[in-house]
Image: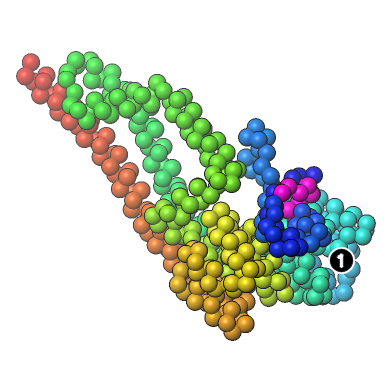
Amino acid sequence: MEKYRYSAFDQTGNKISGVEAANSAGAAHLALLERGYQTVEVSEKKKSILQFEVTKKLVPRKDLMHFSRQLAVFVRAGVPIMEALEIIAGETSDKLLKKCLGDMIERLQSGDTFASAAAAHPETFPSFYLGILSSAELTGNLDGVLDQLADYLDRDIEARGKVTSALIYPAVVAVMAVVVVIILATFVMPKFVVFFKSFNAKLPLPTRLLLSSSNFVGHYWWALVGVIVAIFIGVIAMRRSRSGKARIDAVILHLPLLGDLVRTSIIERICRILSSMLKAGVSLPDAMRVTAESANNAVYSRGLATVREEMIEGQGLAEPLARTELFPGAARQMFRVGEETGTLDAQLATAAAFYDRELDVKLKRFTSLFEPIVIVFMGVIVGFVAIALVSAMYGIYKQVKVQ
């Protein structure tokens, strides 16, 4: 069992916090609900720096989308859930998903509900998925909700694909720039050092700077690699602590160009998840809790958790959201209209579609600006090398001619 930190309101309305042992975050949340607590946040208690995994294996979103579509078809056709899970498990090629479905079948046979069986596998089902499933079991609309989840996952995969494809070319160009610099410093320049020394001539300042840099990289490459590894480990360690992750996420949001892109992507995801959960019949406080956990950004997660607390205290939704200053005016207005007219789910869906289009525009703008920056950087490096070499050649020629 893992340990999960939680903060919640007890039956008297007092805010409490503590640690709950459970198989998953979803199971911890259910255990707290059974005790009568209204949870604000549930997060995994971090292990020591020597115990963490660099990456945690998860079921791909595409496989989860196909699973949702297939299960919706079986449920709509009247096939029992256990039989449907057995058929899907036999056809899936993902080993992690197959193992998860096998365990879910065993849990269902022992009397667990479908939602609680799924909650034992956070590596397969995101928190928003579990929240919607719990609501679907209460309403009896499991097939429709599964279709809705598949639609959300399909749009999420498409949005992630847009970001990835937009960043591939700039990333390749940036890597090539670094490779060119390394080749020049470690292979090309040492040959010129021997050539320049043979003439015993005084070299100009750009050439001396270039040779010194090349000599440093050639002799102390291990120190540079060590610094890079140390930075990498330090960033991972920071992201595993709540305060460190909050600092990193805050810095990312304030980066030029990239920060605006990330902010738009987060707002689109928040609107999409919240809209999907409200359409599925999930209560607004529970939907806000799950959305905060699914924001993938500590600044927004903390802001949404604060909004949820104020909303539970009776301050509504639109005003607390506006006070966070995390959402642009258009989003705040849509929240306000949805709250006042009782069409919050529809307004959120409209906002998600709007910010999806905004994300497309900003991705194109980002790539169009990033490409020339990288090209100019490469031009400066190559130009500096050319000037250093040409000025050295010219200086040597003049000195030899004078002699």
User: What residue is at 76 percent from the left and 63 percent from the top?
Assistant: 11
Q: Is residue 11 left or right of residue 223?
A: right
Q: Is residue 184 left or right of residue 5?
A: left
Q: Nearer the viewer, residue 115 or 321?
A: 321
Q: Nearer the viewer, residue 334 or 71?
A: 334
Q: Is residue 373 left or right of residue 358?
A: left
Determine the secondary structure under disc 1.
helix
Three-letter residue code for mark 1:
Ile
Determine which residue is flagged by label 1. 81
**Image quarter (top left, top right, bottom left or bottom right) of the N terminus:** top right
Q: Position of residue 181 (x, y in %)?
A: 36, 35
Asked whether 56 falls inside the magenta stretch, the response is no
Residue lying farthest to the right in this orientation:
110
User: What residue is at 53 percent from the left and 72 percent from the top?
Assistant: 319
Q: Is residue 186 left or right of residue 287?
A: left
User: What residue is at 81 percent from the left and 70 percent from the top?
Assistant: 137
The segment highlighted magenta reads 18-26
Color theme of the render: rainbow
Q: Position of residue 263 (x, y in %)?
A: 48, 60
Q: Is residue 274 visible?
A: no
Sort mark 1 into few (<14), some (14-19) or many (20+) by Cα contacts within 10 Å: some
**Image quarter (top left, top right, bottom left or bottom right) of the C terminus:** top left
Q: Position of residue 323 (x, y in %)?
A: 49, 66
Can you tell which quarter of the image residue 362 is in? Answer: bottom left
Q: Position of residue 107 (x, y in %)?
A: 88, 56
Can you tell which quarter of the image residue 79 is in? Answer: bottom right
User: What residue is at 57 percent from the left and 79 percent from the top?
Assistant: 338
- Residue 211's place in the image compared with 122, above or below, is above
Q: Nearer the viewer, residue 331 or 154?
A: 331
